């Protein structure tokens, strides 16, 4: 075989072995031949194994059985079904992605909506007695200034002094006005002397005119001079009277009966005339006193002029001072939604002091529905006091409220909310009307319309001011 021929070593190969070895050339050739014979024997064994294995192979490769070709319509059906399956699979995948994105967007939206805590307002039974804070003011009060300039010589009444109308309060020294008055009187005498001479001249020229001794022009000039002298005398008289009146202002008198509540000057002080100068005294009429209070809009229809009221003060526990409603503003203040009301209280003994704080008791006998809300539920806006109410669909409604009394932790609300409304507590300043919110459970397991815990303590809390 050709393999055997190729595996036999040749003499030329033996001769081409590299010289320079440590062995003899004949010995080297024997070793190579021995090695070549071993390699040839190994090749023969491998060839025989290959021939042995080839005898057990089948004589030929069998062809696969030929299948009949599918009809064209059936092939199209199969392709259509496969396309439909692919479309359904793609649609399901797309729907899954859209559902996931929608759920994620909904979850994100829910997380962005704030969650608020709410409470129900507590209902109170209507009161027969409306108690409001009031300020006691003097019936008349006037600052007193000097009408002439000068130096204060002496004051006769100090603070707390009760004075009658026309009583002397102080005296002012006015040397400049005195000299001006003397000068004006002297000028009047001069003008009076000139007028007498003008009258004599005018009468003389009138007589000469009757005999045609003088011209009419000359006679008219003297008559006119006399008339001018009379006018100058009238002006001088007016100036004298003005300075005499200024002289009269050196003495400062009380314009009405009352009590001095302030004295701002001492002897020797420089006094300037007019309101731009130093105020000398402050005089107040304290009998009767005016008591001003602001009645909430819900109670305004029940306030009648002439109605009897009672005034209480902290410094007179258990005592009531009775008065009458003198007048009202007849208009609701748009800033506070209240009606300004004045009550006149007699003060003959002077026990009540102007400037004091008291409480006015109105016997309204109304059926105004009142509720109390936590003080931390109120929002302060430029439009006024507001509370955030949960409206339909969980949206915020900012409602204006009418505040009655302040209990400290709670507020009495006379209008704007009802016991069935859900009020947001601790509302954020950024809360807006119509904003969507999530509502937490009401606090304290409170039920709508539950009676207020303050209702049983109304008598003790009527003294609280709003």
Image: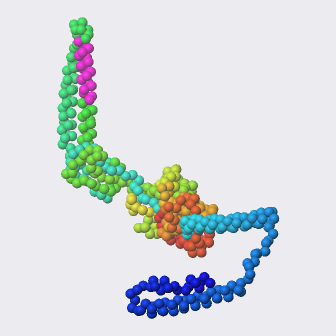
Asked if residue 115 is among those painted magenta in the image, a careful observer would answer no
Task: Left or right? Give the position of 126 relative to 213.
Answer: right
- Which quarter shows the N terminus? bottom right
Q: Position of residue 79 (x, y in %)?
A: 75, 65
Q: Nearer the viewer, residue 166 or 418?
A: 418
**Residue 225 falls inside the magenta stretch:** yes
| Vertical side of 179 occupied by 6: above or below | below
Residue 419 pos. (x, y %)? 60, 66
Q: Which residues are magenta?
A: 218-235
Residue 336 is situated, as x and y percent measured from the top left of the image, at: 49, 56
Q: Nearer the viewer, residue 273 or 250?
A: 273
Q: Residue furthest top?
A: 212
Instruction: Indicate left or right for 22 with 304 as reference.
Output: left
Total marks shown come to: 0
Q: Residue at x 45, y 93 (%)?
A: 27
Q: Is residue 409 above or below residue 164?
A: below
Q: Residue at x 58, y 84 (%)?
A: 5
């Amino acid at each position: 075989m050709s393999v055997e021929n190729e595996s036999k070593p040749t003499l030329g190969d033996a001769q081409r072995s590299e010289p320079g070895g440590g062995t003899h050339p004949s010995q080297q050739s024997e070793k190579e031949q021995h090695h070549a014979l071993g390699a040839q024997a190994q090749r023969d064994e491998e060839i025989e194994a290959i021939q042995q294995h080839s005898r057990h192979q089948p004589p030929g490769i069998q062809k696969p059985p030929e299948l009949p070709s599918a009809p064209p319509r059936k092939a199209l059906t199969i392709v259509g079904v496969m396309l439909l399956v692919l479309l359904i699979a793609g649609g399901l995948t797309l729907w899954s992605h859209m559902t996931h994105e929608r759920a994620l967007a909904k979850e994100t939206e829910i997380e962005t909506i704030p969650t608020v805590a709410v409470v129900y307002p507590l209902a109170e039974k209507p009161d027969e007695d409306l108690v409001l804070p009031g300020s006691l003011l003097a019936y008349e009060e006037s600052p007193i200034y000097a009408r002439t300039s000068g130096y204060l010589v002496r004051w006769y009444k100090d603070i707390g002094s009760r004075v009658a109308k026309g009583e002397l309060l102080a005296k002012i020294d006015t040397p400049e006005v005195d000299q001006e008055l003397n000068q004006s009187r002297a000028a009047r005498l001069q003008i009076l002397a000139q007028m007498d001479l003008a009258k004599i001249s005018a009468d003389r020229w009138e007589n000469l005119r009757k005999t045609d001794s003088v011209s009419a022009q000359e006679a008219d000039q003297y008559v006119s001079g006399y008339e001018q002298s009379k006018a100058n005398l009238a002006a001088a008289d007016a100036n004298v009277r003005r300075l005499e009146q200024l002289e009269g202002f050196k003495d400062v008198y009380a314009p009405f009966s009352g009590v001095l509540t302030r004295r701002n000057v001492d002897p020797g002080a420089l006094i300037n005339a007019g309101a731009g100068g130093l105020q000398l005294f402050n005089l107040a009429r304290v009998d009767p006193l005016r008591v001003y209070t602001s009645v909430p809009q819900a109670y305004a229809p029940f306030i009648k002029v002439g109605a009897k009221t009672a005034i209480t003060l902290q410094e007179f526990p258990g005592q009531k001072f009775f008065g009458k409603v003198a007048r009202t503003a007849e208009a609701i203040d748009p800033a506070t939604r209240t009606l300004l009301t004045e009550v006149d209280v007699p003060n003959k003994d002077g026990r009540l002091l102007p400037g004091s704080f008291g409480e006015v008791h109105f016997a309204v006998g109304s059926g105004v529905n009142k509720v109390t809300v936590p003080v931390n539920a109120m929002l302060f806006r430029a439009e006024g006091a507001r509370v955030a109410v949960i409206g339909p669909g969980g949206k915020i409604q900012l409602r204006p409220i009418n505040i009655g009394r302040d209990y400290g932790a709670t507020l009495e609300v006379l209008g704007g909310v009802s016991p069935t409304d859900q009020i947001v507590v601790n509302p954020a300043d950024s809360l807006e009307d119509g904003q969507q919110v999530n509502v937490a459970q009401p606090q304290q397991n409170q039920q709508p319309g539950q009676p207020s815990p303050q209702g049983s303590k109304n008598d003790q809390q009527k003294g609280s001011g709003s």
